[in-house]
């Protein structure tokens, strides 16, 4: 017989009672002497068995028994006067935190070591920490949870006032802590760690609710659960005194890698997943009661602190089906926050379909389709094409709309897109079910990254372009476009154009061009810039920029409509103008837009406009001016003072350029942008060390002297030969705008398109503060 089998046979004889009582001690001694096999996992198991047999057969504790056993009492409502601070170490407690707590005015510090390696007491001893107030309890079972560990520490604590603290939380030793009022408890979140906390509790109140909820195995939501049960008792939550919690040591923030894997993987890795799961478990399980706390016994003490052994728990384990349901609820909540839509409507099978999507390619559209008549389409889909069906254009059998829809679906397939029909009501969706192989969904869908597209673009070969998510209207105009496409395919030989007739000064022109460029990119059109020198901006496009596609130097707004172009005019003082009218374009028409403002279109927003503005590359003259000035700087300041009644004689400041309301607003904000209004805020930033190097730009020459006399060489600027609207001045203005954009913070002038331009030109996110609004 193998020696290992012989050892097991002898052990079985002891356990079965076949060994006489008088020979049991000798048998155990023999087993202990021969337990070693050289296999680590086998020897560890045998040592544990022998230890348990020794504990079961241990004599009644006396003075000669160093490891006496006694049951750890349940949490008692009474305690000695004073404060016991209790913390749990599951492997991340820093010695510096213990040193910090011992420096505070507490009578006892109880630390529960959750079977860490090396033991906590060993680490404290190595660091030279010895204090009569310190008690270390080491749990001999690494299966004990965070909530059970805290309850063990709270039961071992001796004082009437209990401070429950997270390992990341530090305290100010000099802070004055008032007595805790009856009928209340205090709570505060840690400052250096999102999971940090400190609870200040009366022992009597904590005993009444049974301590932490041991149904919850992790700290996530456990503090909130305890606070909720205290509130049910009628206790009022108070905040701790200001300054009691201090900032702990900062650690370098790790750059989170881009998400990979499935949506389920990403959501489970979310820091909120475990908290949401525990929240649902807390609601689903019976009310927590203190008598269910994990029973434990003390195994005596040694240099590594008191040892505690957990016995069979009387608390019922959380059933697997409740854990599973709680995890599903947590995933649904996180999915709704991340994607939008209504994931709660999905059955478990349909929910799994969406959760299995790659995290980088999933949206609320997948949720809507999973809830539709064709949920399996989520598994096999390519790029989505959302087709917005107008109520009067349903593709009913035999109708022209049905024929047009069939052609549209074929083009979508060639473009690598999976069509989804979006309708306005559930009744319409029901009517279409069975008439189309496409998923049919209702209501609005929040789908970032979906580009508005047109029938004309779908008709073009995909080429080497990757398929992209898109939206497409299907209405009466679509039928006309479809007929045009079938009858005149030569229309596809050229791209329709967006003509942008940019107006007013440099900042106005560039933002209008940027907005039109975003629309052109989003609808696959060619951008044509119309840059007509005038009193507002007396330079040519080429004076500022390298060539950027087609550029015209003369407007033709009056002829554009006769030439068959769609015309949009945002210049509200001109005839037939409609500022802020949505830019809605026919599929094959050229578009003429006259504006000094951003345009209203799904394709145009701050992000896409600023992507477009980067296509306008400054020429060598402008670049040389930029490099001639110190940059980057800590702070940029733009002072826009010129304007108002005293400047109305200038053609570019004349009231005829704006509506009466707009002219009144301009006068108001120019007064608020006087250079003196900038000084208090700049002084604050200088005092905070955030403005050691400052770049200044202004339309008023005297401002530079004022700032230099006050701030000395911390101020720099680009000297201008003039401050009018001449070609030379505009070249310097563009260099100023670029330099203003090369700082992390801008103090700008409200109602100034030039301050806005500086923010748009910033390569990195910029903090923008405006006069009259922020300072």
Image (cartoon, rainbow, N blue to C red):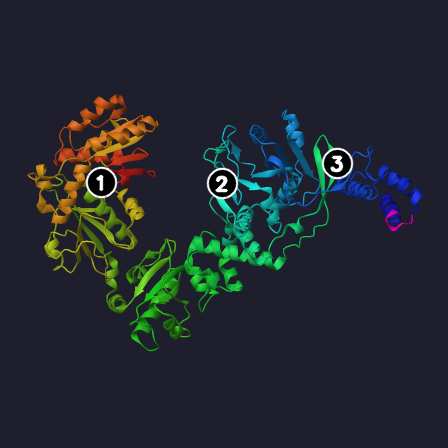
In the image, taking residue 207 as reference, residue 765 lies left or right, namely left
Callout 1: helix, strand or loop?
loop
Q: Mark 2 or 1, which is nearer the eye?
A: 2
Residue indicated by mark 3: 300
Instruction: Examine the rendering and report whether any part of residue 505 can be seen.
Output: no
Q: Quadrant of residue 759?
A: top left
Local packing at callout 2 (Cα closer than 10 Å; few below 14, some 14-19, many 20+) is some
Residue drawn where x is 28% and y is 61% of the image: 456
Residue 438 at what x, y percent from top left? 41, 68
Local packing at callout 1 (Cα closer than 10 Å; few below 14, some 14-19, many 20+) is many
- Real-space Cα separation, disc 1 to disc 3, in angstroms: 73 Å
* Tag 1 and tag 3, C-beta contact below 8 Å: no
In the image, taking residue 670 as reference, residue 172 lies left or right, namely right
Label of residue 750 in the image? 1
**Comes first in the chain, label 2 or label 3:** 2
Residue 123 at what x, y percent from top left? 64, 30
Residue drawn where x is 22% and y is 26% of the image: 707
Q: Quadrant of residue 76?
A: top right
Which region shows up in magenta? 14-18
Residue 132 at what x, y percent from top left? 66, 28
Callout 2: helix, strand or loop?
strand
Residue drawn where x is 62% and y is 26% of the image: 127
In this orientation, which residue lies closer to the viewer: 400 or 273? Answer: 273
Residue indicated by mark 2: 189
- Real-space Cα separation, disc 2 to disc 3, in angstroms: 35 Å
Callout 3: helix, strand or loop?
strand
Is 82 drawn above or below residue 521 in the view shown? above
* Tag 2 and tag 3, C-beta contact below 8 Å: no
């Amino acid at each position: 017989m193998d020696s290992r089998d012989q050892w097991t046979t002898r052990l079985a004889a002891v356990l079965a009672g076949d060994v006489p009582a008088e020979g049991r001690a000798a048998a155990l001694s023999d087993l202990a002497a021969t337990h070693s096999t050289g296999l680590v996992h086998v020897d560890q198991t045998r040592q544990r068995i022998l230890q348990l047999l020794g504990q079961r057969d241990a004599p009644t504790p006396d003075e000669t028994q160093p490891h006496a056993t006694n049951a750890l009492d349940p949490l008692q409502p009474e305690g000695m006067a004073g404060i016991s601070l209790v913390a749990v170490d599951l492997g991340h407690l820093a010695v510096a935190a213990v040193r910090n707590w011992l420096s505070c005015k507490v009578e006892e510090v109880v630390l529960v070591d959750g079977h860490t390696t090396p033991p906590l007491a060993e680490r404290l001893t190595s660091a030279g920490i010895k204090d009569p107030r310190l008690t270390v309890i080491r749990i001999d079972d690494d299966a004990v949870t965070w909530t059970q560990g805290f309850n063990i520490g709270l039961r071992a604590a001796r004082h009437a006032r209990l401070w429950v603290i997270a390992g990341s939380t530090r305290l100010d030793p000099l802070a004055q802590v008032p007595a805790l009022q009856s009928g209340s408890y205090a709570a505060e979140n840690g400052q250096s760690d999102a999971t940090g906390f400190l609870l200040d509790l009366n022992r009597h109140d904590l005993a009444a609710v049974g301590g932490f909820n041991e149904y919850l195995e992790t700290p996530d939501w456990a503090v909130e659960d305890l606070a909720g049960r205290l509130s049910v008792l009628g206790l009022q939550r108070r905040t701790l005194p200001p300054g009691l919690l201090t900032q702990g040591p900062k650690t370098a923030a790790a750059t989170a890698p881009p998400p990979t894997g499935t949506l389920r993987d990403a959501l489970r890795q979310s820091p909120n997943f475990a908290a949401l799961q525990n929240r649902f478990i807390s609601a689903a399980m019976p009310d927590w009661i203190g008598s269910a706390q994990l029973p434990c016994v003390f195994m005596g003490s040694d240099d590594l602190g008191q040892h505690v052994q957990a016995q069979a728990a009387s608390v019922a384990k959380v059933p697997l089906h409740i854990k599973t349901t709680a995890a599903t609820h947590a995933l649904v909540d996180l999915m709704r926050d991340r994607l939008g839509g209504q994931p709660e409507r999905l059955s478990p099978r349909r929910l799994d379909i969406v959760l299995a999507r790659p995290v980088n390619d999933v949206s609320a559209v997948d949720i809507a389709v999973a809830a539709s008549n064709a949920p399996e389409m989520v598994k096999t889909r390519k790029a989505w094409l959302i087709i917005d069906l107008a109520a009067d254009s349903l593709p009913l059998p035999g109708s022209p709309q049905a024929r047009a829809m069939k052609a549209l679906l074929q083009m979508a397939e060639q473009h690598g897109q999976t069509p989804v029909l979006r309708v306005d009501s559930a009744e319409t969706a029901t009517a279409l079910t069975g008439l189309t192989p496409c998923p049919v969904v209702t209501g609005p869908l929040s789908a970032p990254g979906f580009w508005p597209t047109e029938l004309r673009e779908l008709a073009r070969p995909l080429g080497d372009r990757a398929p992209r998510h898109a939206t497409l209207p299907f209405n009466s105009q679509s039928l006309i476009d479809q007929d045009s496409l079938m009858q005149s395919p030569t229309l596809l030989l050229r791209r329709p154009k967006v003509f942008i007739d940019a107006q007013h000064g440099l900042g106005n022109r560039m933002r209008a061009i940027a907005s039109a460029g975003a629309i052109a990119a989003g609808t696959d059109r060619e951008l044509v810039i119309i840059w007509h020198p005038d009193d507002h901006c007396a330079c040519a496009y080429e004076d500022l920029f390298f060539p950027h596609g087609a550029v015209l130097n003369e407007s033709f707004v009056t002829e554009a409509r006769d030439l068959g172009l769609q015309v949009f005019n945002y210049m509200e003082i001109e005839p037939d103008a409609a500022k802020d009218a949505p830019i809605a374009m026919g599929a094959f028409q050229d578009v003429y837009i006259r504006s000094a403002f951003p345009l209203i279109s799904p394709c145009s927003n701050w992000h896409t406009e600023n992507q477009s503005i980067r296509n306008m590359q400054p020429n060598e003259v402008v670049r040389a001016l930029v490099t001639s000035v110190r940059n980057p700087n800590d702070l940029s300041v733009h002072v826009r003072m010129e304007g108002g009644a005293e400047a109305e004689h200038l053609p570019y400041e004349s009231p005829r350029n704006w509506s009466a309301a707009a002219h009144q607003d301009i006068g108001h904000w120019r007064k608020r942008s006087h250079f003196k209004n900038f000084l208090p805020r700049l002084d604050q930033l200088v005092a905070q060390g955030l403005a050691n190097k400052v770049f200044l730009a202004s339309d008023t020459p005297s401002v530079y002297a004022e700032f230099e006399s006050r701030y000395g060489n911390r101020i720099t600027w680009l000297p201008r030969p003039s401050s009018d609207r001449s070609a030379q001045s505009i070249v310097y203005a563009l260099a100023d705008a670029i330099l203003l954009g090369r700082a992390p913070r801008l103090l700008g002038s409200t109602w100034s398109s030039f301050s806005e331009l500086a923010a748009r030109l910033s390569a990195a996110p910029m903090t923008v503060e405006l006069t009259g609004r922020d300072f």
